[in-house]
Image (tube, grey):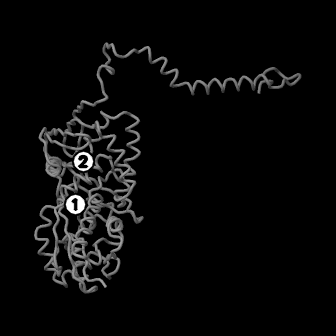
């Protein structure tokens, strides 16, 4: 018998109506678990709202520092990007939220876990794979896979009937997910991939056309692949991301419009704003290009999409990720230095780069006179580098000559016809 259910709670439309629904259908007390990972004002009054909806208690957990250091930084250092564009803001957060939900569930002796993910989305997989890793004994309740509510319009009507206050309306019905790393938008007019996102959709970034007419340079500092400073000022992980969100946002940096492949097999459209993350990803990639050798870069570029896939698919708590992290950590030991980015009306360009570990050495690449590189050495290098091509060419010539020598001569035939 289920007496207590721990619900992953955001205070949004879906989880708000789940509280009374769980009480009605399971007769159990509902303990809500809300994670503070940078939603800003969205969490204001969330505990009071949960209790007013019928929850016995709502725990609001501040996970911002852990989110950045244990989830965002490893994914950034891996260079993981999904679908060529998506910097995985929602994907990275779910394993953390679900893990903390399980910890609270254990503390309150919950008999079951619940979430507000739909049966069409990726989040249901991310939550439940985490449950499987930390609470394989607890049953999972996913109301969207059980109830007769079939649309967000139905959900709004249910909320009204049960006097549950929600921010969503029939006119502005976007589904949003916000944290320190990004803000995502889905639903409404965005469900038509041919539609242009309306100007009032965006909340973190200025319209690039209305951004400042003067470029702004920002200097990002890294230590062993981890961001540590902005414009020479050392900042905590949370403050660093917040600062870059502000800087990037005012220049319209980090907007993407993506038709992505969901894990369940369908394509969906999402519009994402990731201003600070875009700056960090650009700078980190450029610093690696300066510091890492060609073959290490190539190996890391093979790992990056695999890492992105496992994050997107909710496979965070796996040996695969641990193995990738071990590789990435080795590659990042010398990724220390600074990158200067120039921001202008939605664009980011690299304006400068420096590192004590840079493999770029002007003494070797200069077009001027130098005494460290013997240009005559290149002849021997090229002969060895192209040896397989030379051997093949010689072998092909020998075979061609042998074919000519063994062609029979037809008596009385013109000499020209005797050569096949």
Residue 98 higher or lower than 31, as above or below: above
Residue 28 visible (yes or no): yes
Residue 115 higher or lower than 184, as above or below: below
Q: Which residue is mark 2?
A: 278
Residue 217 pos. (x, y %): 16, 38
Mark 2 vs mark 1: in front: 2
Looking at the figure, which quarter contains the N terminus?
bottom left
Q: Nearer the viewer, residue 4 or 116?
A: 4
Q: Which mark is residue 198?
A: 1
Left or right of 189? Residue 248 is: left
- Alpha-carbon neighbours of circle 2 within 10 Å: few (<14), some, or many (≥20)? many
Q: Which mark is residue 33?
A: none
Looking at the figure, which quarter contains the C terminus?
top right
Identify the residue at horizontal 26%, vertical 61% (top origin): 96
Q: Secondary structure at mark 1?
A: loop
Q: Whole-Å distance between the Cαs marked 2 and 1?
A: 22 Å
Q: Nearer the viewer, residue 15 or 291?
A: 291
Whether tag 2 and tag 1 are in contact, CB under 8 A, the answer is: no
Residue 14 visible (yes or no): no
């Amino acid at each position: 018998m289920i007496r207590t259910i721990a619900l992953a709670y955001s205070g949004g439309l879906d989880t708000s109506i789940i509280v009374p629904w769980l009480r009605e259908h399971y007769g159990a007390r509902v303990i809500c678990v809300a994670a503070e990972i940078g939603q800003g004002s969205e969490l204001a009054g969330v505990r009071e709202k949960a209790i007013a909806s019928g929850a016995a208690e709502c725990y609001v957990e501040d996970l911002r520092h852990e989110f950045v250091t244990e989830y965002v930084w490893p994914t950034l250092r891996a260079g993981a990007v999904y679908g060529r564009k998506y910097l995985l803001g929602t994907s990275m957060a779910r394993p953390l939220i679900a893990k903390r939900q399980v910890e609270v569930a254990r503390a309150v002796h919950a008999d079951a876990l619940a979430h507000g993910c739909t049966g069409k989305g990726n989040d249901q997989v991310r939550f439940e794979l985490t449950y499987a890793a930390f609470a394989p004994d607890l049953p999972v309740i996913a109301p969207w896979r059980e109830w007769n509510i079939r649309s967000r319009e139905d959900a709004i009507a249910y909320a009204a009937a049960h006097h549950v206050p929600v921010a969503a309306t029939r006119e502005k019905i976007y589904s949003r997910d916000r944290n320190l790393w990004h803000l995502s938008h889905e639903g409404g007019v965005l469900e038509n991939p041919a539609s242009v996102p309306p100007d009032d959709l965006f909340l973190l970034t200025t319209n690039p056309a209305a951004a400042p007419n003067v470029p702004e340079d920002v200097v990002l500092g890294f230590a062993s692949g981890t961001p540590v400073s902005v414009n020479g000022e050392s900042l905590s992980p949370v403050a660093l991301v917040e600062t870059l969100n502000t800087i990037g946002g005012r220049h319209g940096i980090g907007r993407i419009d993506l038709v992505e492949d969901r894990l369940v097999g369908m394509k969906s459209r999402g519009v994402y704003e990731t201003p600070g993350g875009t700056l960090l990803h650009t700078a980190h990639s450029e610093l690696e290009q300066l510091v890492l050798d060609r073959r290490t870069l190539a190996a890391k570029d093979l790992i990056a999409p695999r890492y992105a896939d496992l994050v997107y698919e909710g496979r965070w708590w796996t040996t695969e990720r641990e193995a990738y992290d071990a590789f990435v950590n080795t590659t990042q030991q010398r990724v220390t230095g600074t990158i200067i980015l120039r921001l202008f009306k939605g664009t980011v360009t690299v304006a400068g780069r420096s590192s004590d570990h840079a493999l770029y050495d002007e003494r070797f690449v200069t077009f001027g006179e130098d005494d460290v590189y013997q240009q005559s050495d290149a002849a021997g290098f090229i002969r060895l580098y192209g040896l397989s091509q030379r051997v093949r060419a010689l072998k092909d010539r020998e075979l061609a000559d042998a074919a000519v020598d063994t062609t029979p001569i037809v008596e009385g035939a013109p000499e020209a016809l005797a050569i096949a």
